[in-house]
Image (spheres, rainbow, N blue to C red):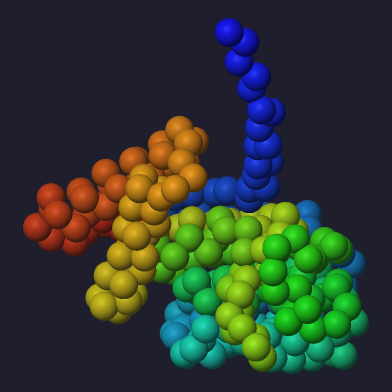
Amino acid sequence: SLVKFKSMKFRNFKMVSYVVYGRGSFNQLDEILAPQRKGEAPMIFLVDHFFDGKALPDRVPLRGKDKIIFTDVTYEPKTTQVDALAKGLKEEFGAVSGVIGIGGGSTMDLAKAVGLMMTNPGSSADYQGWDLVKVPGVYKAGIPTLSGTGAEVSRTTVLTGPTRKLGMNSDFTPFDQIVLDPELTANAPVNQRFYTGMDCYIHCIESLQGTYLNEFSKSYGEKALKKKKKVFVEKDHWDDESDDQLMM
């Protein structure tokens, strides 16, 4: 007998364009950003307010009109917060060369959203959903200081809007560059390190036990879960290797 196969629709994934990984890689940030600068238009660094008054902001390679904005991420990012930041930057600078998020998942989500709203009209609430963003944002870079949220590689940015909590999920959302430096997680509070680690653990289980699975997603889930077991189950102490493994 003849069997008729129905043609399948495959998802074409947009991923982060450039990745640098390794201890001390944050020191390359000035070199990485240099080709992305557009005249006098500044780079805007959105930094988790946890680092206000600490050493990390002094290491940010400020040039010209560059600006550091400490972002309060006590709660998850709101569309009103995104809109206010984008509006303020447009009024102060007109245009910016890029937006760089340095912090945990909420800070990176905020950076992705603000980067998109520098070029897209209206409110970020208008773009909560799937593939509603039609215009590329400005250059965006993500530098996680916590490991496990996955925000640095996600094509969504989760926002709490006036009527719903939903991501701006689009091919224009991912970062153009991420810098993965395990040294930046060294001073993370123990409970926060554990919570974000469990976030990654849940992602692994979803990748291995969910409904829509394939070998591509399973391979990432299997490797990540193996690393998580090494960090949280097999080892009896926390060291630099633990930070390296967890960031991967």
Query: Could you say where residue 55 lies in the image, as x and y percent from the top left?
Result: 45, 80
In this view, the residue in front, 78 or 246, is 78
Query: Could you say where residue 205 lies in the image, as x and y percent from the top left?
Result: 33, 52
Name the residue at the left extreme: 236
Whether 176 is drawn above or below 113: the answer is above
Specify the quadrant of the image occupied by residue 33. bottom right
In this view, the residue in front, 134 or 2, is 2
- 177 vs 43, left or right, is left
Question: Which residue is located at x 48 percent, y 36 percent?
Answer: 214
Whether 139 is drawn above or below 65: the answer is above
Question: Which residue is located at x 44 percent, y 85 percent?
Answer: 50
Name the residue at the top extreme: 1
Query: Could you say where residue 45 lies in the image, as x and y percent from the top left?
Result: 65, 76
Does any portion of residue 69 appear in the rendered image? no
- 153 vs 54, left or right, is right
In this view, the residue in front, 47 or 34, is 47
In this view, the residue in front, 30 or 49, is 49
